[in-house]
Amino acid sequence: MIAERNGVPAMSVMTSAFSDAAQLMARVQGVPMHPFAVIEHPIASADENGLDVRAREAVRKAVEVLVG
């Protein structure tokens, strides 16, 4: 969010369980329109396939946000 606030295109990745808190933090940090890639929760207990799916989704969303 600091990069975004300084004019550098940026985004954050978090799991669905933290989406509301992240949006609140973006507003508090002064970047209410900060883009997020929200992926499935949880990460810690996901197996290798689950992590792969989440990572691919995060990359897809990052490209969508940062490249257009």
Image (cartoon, helix red, strand yellow):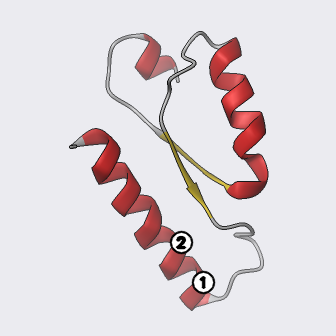
Q: Which mark is residue 6?
A: none
Return the residue found at the far left.
67
Q: For the C terminus, give its image quadrant.
A: top left
- Identify the secondary structure beneath mark 1: helix
Q: Residue at x 39, y 55 (%)?
A: 61
Question: Mark 2 is on which residue type?
Answer: Arg
Picture coordinates of residue 7, whole percent (x, y)? 33, 13
- Identify the secondary structure beneath mark 2: helix
Q: Residue at x 28, y 40 (%)?
A: 66
Number of dots carrying numbers? 2
Asked if residue 63 is positioned above or below residue 1 in the image, the reply reads below
What is the crowding at mark 2: few (fewer than 14 residues within 10 Å), some, or many (at least 20)? many
Q: Residue at x 65, y 67 (%)?
A: 40
Horizontal side of 39 relative to 63 (left or right) equals right
Asked if residue 7 is positioned above or below residue 65 in the image, the reply reads above
Horizontal side of 19 relative to 68 (left or right) equals right
Asked if residue 5 is positioned above or below residue 46 in the image, the reply reads above
Horizontal side of 24 relative to 9 (left or right) equals right
Q: Residue at x 49, y 80 (%)?
A: 52
What is the crowding at mark 1: few (fewer than 14 residues within 10 Å), some, or many (at least 20)? some
Picture coordinates of residue 28, whole percent (x, y)? 70, 13
Instruction: Mark 2 and mark 1 in contact? Answer it, CB < 8 Å.
Output: yes
- Looking at the image, which is closer to me, 35 or 9? 35
Horizontal side of 23 relative to 49 (left or right) equals right
Picture coordinates of residue 17, whole percent (x, y)? 78, 54
Q: Which mark is residue 50?
A: 1
Question: Mark 1 is on which residue type?
Answer: Gly
How many angstroms separate mark 2 from mark 1 (CA)? 6 Å
The quarter of the picture where residue 44 lies is bottom right
Asked if residue 44 is positioned above or below residue 46 in the image, the reply reads above
Q: Which mark is residue 54?
A: 2
Picture coordinates of residue 3, whole percent (x, y)? 42, 21
